[in-house]
Image (cartoon, grey):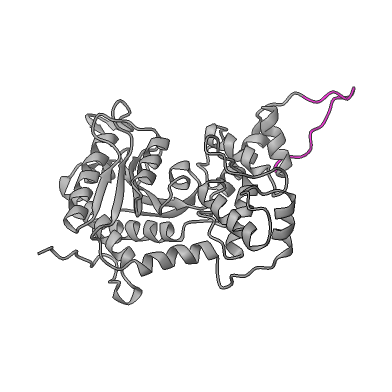
Amino acid sequence: MADVHAALRSLGLLPPTAGTADGEPLEEVYDTATELAVRHFQQVRGLSVDGRVGEETYRALSEARWSLGDRLLHHDPVRPIRGDDVINLQDRLHELGYDAGPVDGVFGTETEIGLRAFQRDYGLTADGTCGPATLRALRQLGRKVTGGRPQLLRQSASFVESGPHLIGRRIVVDPGHGGPDTGFTAGETTEADLVLDLASRIEGRLAAAGATVYLTRGRDQAPTLQERTAFANDARADLFLSLHLDAHPSEHARGVASYYYGTGSGPSSTVGEQFANLVRREVIARTGMLDLGSHAKTWDLLRMSRMPAVRMDCGYLSHPVDRLLLLDARLRSTVASAVVAAVQRLFLPAEADPPTGTFVLPARV
């Protein structure tokens, strides 16, 4: 608990600690002020806002305390260095015109390659380690790339240049849960079974359009989040779509939402955001379900994917209207068609992009 309070104080989310009359520090407790501080931190960092310090929130607090220059940064393939200082380094390299990979706060191979290229160009020892000499050079140089965030411009341009067709595209579809992890259960209906059925329908339609599609699991498998993202990365996928259904105690909770990597104000996936918006709008237009919007999140499922990744919550099994819709195989087929339309629209040039809800993938001859 003490390290959580220390991290929140270092971020200015809690006041400095007070002491007792004899100078001893007060016992740290998880009070209302702490919960509010945690909720604020989760909101700003793109985490699930629940006021609890679970594994993901604790790791994010630990990463947030690092500033560029606090430590040596290098690539460790076994235990990659993660933190806000890595985000600052990646951002700076991109501003100078070097491709350091996604701005995700993880010092990986792409960041090392970008750093070595910078060091070589500026007469530094190209050891891939960000130490004092490299920091001085980074701080002395002005920004070279203008007109937008360089990494985002590069990501968008690569999709436009790759052409409008789906033939040969590698797409990973991730049905959530699986095996003993059934997700939310309503009677004999489980979230795991429904999203697997939906994923299979999407797989068939994308394959018919010429794409190579991989599912992260079968009926009896329950891969971890790390295994799901590793699967997509190893497949060198062009897109990653994770499918879920939601549940909530509130009787009013219903609708469709999508999520992409980002904090809302900092680094984000441009193509991921575009795909999240496209797929959500296509589903809403074709099903009439409630629109809950697209949201930036830093969940590891989205953050650790090396390609544009989106999680889509396709409705609330806990709501009677959504549940009735989702149990209808025709509705699931409609959602699958909407997903395929969104995938195709992602690769179309702006002048050829049709209005939402109107695109129909032509049959292959």
Whether residue 237 is visible, yes or no, is yes
Q: Nearer the viewer, residue 46 or 113?
A: 113
The image position of residue 331, as x and y in percent, is 20, 50
Task: Answer above or below: position of 71 versus 52.
Answer: below
In magenta, the rendered stretch is 13-26
Q: How many marks?
A: 0
Left or right for 361, reference 300? left
Which residue is found at the position 30% from the left and 72% from the top? 353
Which quadrant of the view contains residue 164? Answer: bottom left
Magenta-span inclusion, residue 190? no
Task: Answer above or below: position of 80 versus 339.
Answer: above
Residue sitting at the far right: 22
The image position of residue 258, as x and y in percent, is 39, 51
Left or right for 292, reference 144? left
Residue sitting at the far bottom: 351
Left or right for 188, reference 139? left
Which residue is found at the position 66% from the left and 27% from the top? 1
The image position of residue 321, as x and y in percent, is 27, 45
Left or right for 145, reference 209? right
The image position of residue 24, as x and y in percent, is 84, 23
Quarter of the image with the C terminus in it: bottom left
Task: Answer above or below: position of 184 versus 136.
Answer: above
Please name the predominant secondary structure of the magenta segment in the image.
loop
Which quadrant of the view contains residue 361? Answer: bottom left
Magenta-span inclusion, residue 25? yes
Q: Nearer the viewer, residue 168 or 31?
A: 168
Which residue is found at the position 35% from the left and 55% from the top? 238
Q: Nearer the viewer, residue 295 or 152?
A: 152
Whether residue 92 is visible, yes or no, is no
